[in-house]
Image (cartoon, rainbow, N blue to C red):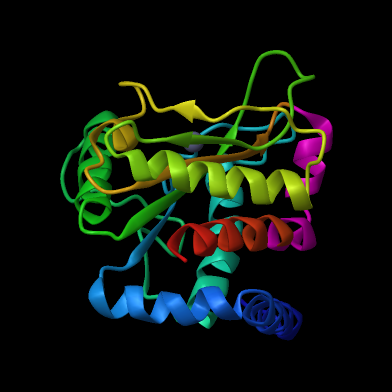
Amino acid sequence: MKTVTDVAIVLVCGALLFTLLFGVADRRSAVSSADPDPIVIDPGHGGADGGATAADGTEEKTLNLAVALPLRDLLTVMGYPVVMTRTDDTMLHTEGSTLRERKVSDMRNRLALVNTAALTVSIHQNKFPQTQYWGTQVFYSANTEESRVLAESVRSCVVDWLQPDNKRELKRGTEDVYLLHRATRPMILVECGFLSNASDLSKLQEAAYRQQLAFAVAVGTMKYIG
Ligand SMILES: [Zn+2]
């Protein structure tokens, strides 16, 4: 359920964005009319597929959606057509009886959306055995040069505004990242933070931080489009 505060924050951010990016928004309308394909936002995992789990039991799927929803709201306020792969705690499978089969079906259905999009931003969380690793990292599809440009735009916004000490470089999506490896349209995957790092986890559990992160990703995406 969206609170009044959430809506107010999104509207204020939207107005601020418009002020900051008026020129970009102006050019964007020309881009949109020539290319009406939507921006796809993909909150990773969902339903029986929880993704990674933090030591305190927080599931990745929940944080992914909690970052993706304000990202959707910001881009929508700015006038972009947005399609979500999911808006609640579900998988996208249309067939399969075992979890493994359902995950395959879920990925195929996500890919079908990705490959009709102007661009896709997939939202995930990282986890590593050693707890000291922290910070957002952006992966890109190697299938299109634009994916790397989009990834750099988002990375630089996150670092400039939220994580000035983050030295993580962009990473090319390898074969084991199903969607990035098969995307034929520009696509990035944002690993927002490490569930294995106490500081990242506690920040990601705060709505205000998630909104700031969504704001940085939204501006990075709009700068790329503009
Ligand atoms: Zn994930």
Q: Which residues are magenta?
A: 197-211
Which residue, as the protein is rendered here, is positioned at the far left?
95
* In magenta segment, residue 173: no
Work out whether 122 lies above or below 10: above
Q: Nearer the viewer, residue 8 or 103?
A: 8
Residue 28 in which image quadrant: bottom left
Picture residue at 54% right of the left edge, 82% below the top: 77
Can I make out residue 48 in this image? no
- Residue 98: x and y in percent read 24, 32
Work out whether 133 lies above or below 34: above
Can I make out residue 89 in this image? yes
Image quarter where the N terminus lies is bottom right
Give the tally of numbered discs: 0
- Name the dominant secondary structure of the magenta segment: helix
- Residue 94: x and y in percent read 18, 51
For this view, does 97 lie left or right of residue 23?
Answer: left
For this view, does 117 lie left or right of residue 221?
Answer: left
Picture residue at 61% right of the left edge, 43% below the top: 155
Picture residue at 56% right of the left edge, 78% below the top: 23
- Residue 128: x and y in percent read 64, 19
Residue 57 in which image quadrant: top right
* In magenta segment, residue 208: yes
Which residue, as the protein is rendered here, is positioned at the far top?
130
- Residue 218: x and y in percent read 57, 62
Q: Nearer the viewer, residue 45 or 137?
A: 137
Q: Nearer the viewer, residue 141 or 199?
A: 141
